[in-house]
């Protein structure tokens, strides 16, 4: 196995499968009159296989919200992964419920979805009140009726801090991706800028991994103890706890500005493969890449220690042509949904924050 043979792929360039739809509307309980919830954009989808079909949880934006359009999540289904039928009403949206203050008027952004071992679908998304994004969790048995569970980090010091992009670890079982455990825990990579991790017992409530941010040492005198330093003992005092950073930007590379988890990572024979999205810095970034351009890369984590990076691609593995690079935000290829289907990987990406494309690769592992 070479230094990059562990990576998923090679993938084809994205082919457009879905875009904005002004003809789908619903009666939003927080607005007056019908709202065309995907009239402006349809992008950044989560993906899962259900009843033999590929199902996308699509982020749609209307054209009337204050923050470049309020975001809602709709369901699109396909028998081949290319031709999709979009449900007329969103399946997850801001409403007159206990989470309204967290989700309105910005909306529900960037869903990622996995299948739990018991068949339940678990969706992570960003609840955006217009000022701060917060990572939320919802569950469903059929992808249409959802239960919102609120902040993924409820009860932790991070519940009111900006959090997003929760990608839950999966593995291939009988040809489909299912949530996987390591040492009896579910794992999730998350964050924007830097990639962090969290663990859970139930896929709903998550505990972020922390590390001592400023450890210190000091000497103590103990007449009852004798060692290499005599009665003096070197003690370590933990500093304040902070989030444990696993991977971040690299100067002069395509991911020099930020790194953000993409679709749910996959436990493979070579380790945990995480597709992530990197953005290029306007200073000191990759000279052959436009400033602020988003392109996906891949990270490899140790399966025995999901916090340890043991491999990373040097360059993005997916790019978009000029015709798909134009849109709400140009030069963005944002990978977010991954499924195993008919012996192939189907990777769904948001293109220019405006539409959705699919890339295809054979399923195979070099060991």
Image (cartoon, rainbow, N blue to C red):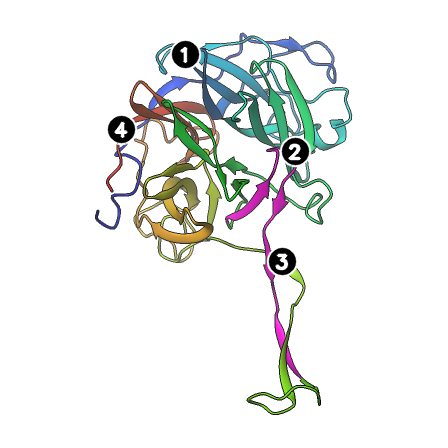
Give the numbered dot on residue 128: 2
From where the camera sits, is residue 320 visible? yes
* Residue 136 placement: quadrant: top right
**Quick one: label 3 or label 4, which is nearer the N terminus?**
4
Q: Nearer the viewer, residue 61 or 168?
A: 168
Image position, residue 176 (x, y; %) = 40, 23
**Quick one: label 1 or label 2, which is nearer the N terminus?**
1
**Quick one: label 3 or label 2, which is nearer the N terminus?**
2
Q: Left or right: where does residue 206 sit relative to residue 359? A: right
Image position, residue 76 (x, y; %) = 48, 14
From where the camera sits, is residue 257 visible? no
Hey, which residue is sitting farthest bottom in the picture? Answer: 230
Question: To which residue does mark 4 refer?
Answer: 12
Q: Specify the segment rendered in magenta.
A: 195-219
Question: To which residue does mark 3 refer?
Answer: 242
- Residue ID at (68%, 25%): 148
């Amino acid at each position: 196995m070479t230094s990059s043979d562990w990576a998923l792929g090679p993938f084809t360039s994205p082919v457009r499968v879905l875009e904005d739809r002004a003809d789908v509307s619903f009666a939003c309980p927080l607005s007056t009159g019908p709202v065309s919830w995907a009239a402006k954009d349809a992008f950044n989808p989560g993906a899962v296989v259900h009843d033999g079909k590929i199902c996308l949880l699509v982020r749609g934006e209307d054209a009337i919200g204050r923050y470049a359009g309020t975001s809602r999540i709709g369901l699109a289904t396909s028998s081949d992964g290319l031709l999709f039928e979009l449900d007329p009403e969103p399946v997850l949206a801001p409403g007159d419920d206990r989470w309204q203050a967290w989700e309105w008027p910005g909306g529900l952004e960037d869903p990622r979805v996995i299948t739990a071992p018991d068949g339940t679908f678990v969706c992570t998304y960003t609840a955006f009140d217009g000022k701060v994004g917060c990572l939320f969790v919802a569950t469903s048995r059929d992808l249409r009726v959802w239960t919102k569970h609120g902040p993924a980090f409820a009860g932790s010091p991070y519940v009111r801090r900006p959090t997003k992009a929760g990608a839950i670890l999966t593995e291939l079982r009988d040809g489909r991706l299912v949530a996987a455990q390591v040492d009896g825990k579910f794992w999730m990579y998350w964050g924007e800028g830097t990639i962090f991790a969290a663990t859970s017992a139930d896929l709903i409530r998550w505990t972020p991994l922390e590390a001592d941010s400023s450890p210190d040492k000091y000497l103590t005198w103990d007449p009852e103890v004798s060692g290499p330093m005599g009665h003096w003992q070197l003690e370590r005092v933990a500093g304040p706890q902070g989030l444990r950073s696993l991977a971040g930007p690299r100067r002069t590379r395509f991911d020099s500005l930020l790194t953000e988890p993409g679709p749910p990572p996959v436990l493979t024979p070579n380790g945990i493969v995480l597709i992530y999205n990197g953005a290029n810095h306007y200073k000191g970034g990759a000279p052959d890449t436009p400033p602020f351009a988003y392109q996906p890369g891949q990270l490899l984590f140790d399966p025995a220690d999901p916090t340890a990076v043991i491999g990373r691609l040097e360059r993005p593995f997916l790019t978009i042509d000029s015709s798909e690079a134009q849109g709400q935000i140009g030069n963005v290829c944002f990978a977010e949904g991954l499924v195993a289907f008919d012996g192939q990987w189907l990777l769904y990406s948001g293109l220019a924050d405006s539409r959705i494309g699919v890339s295809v690769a054979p399923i195979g592992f070099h060991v």
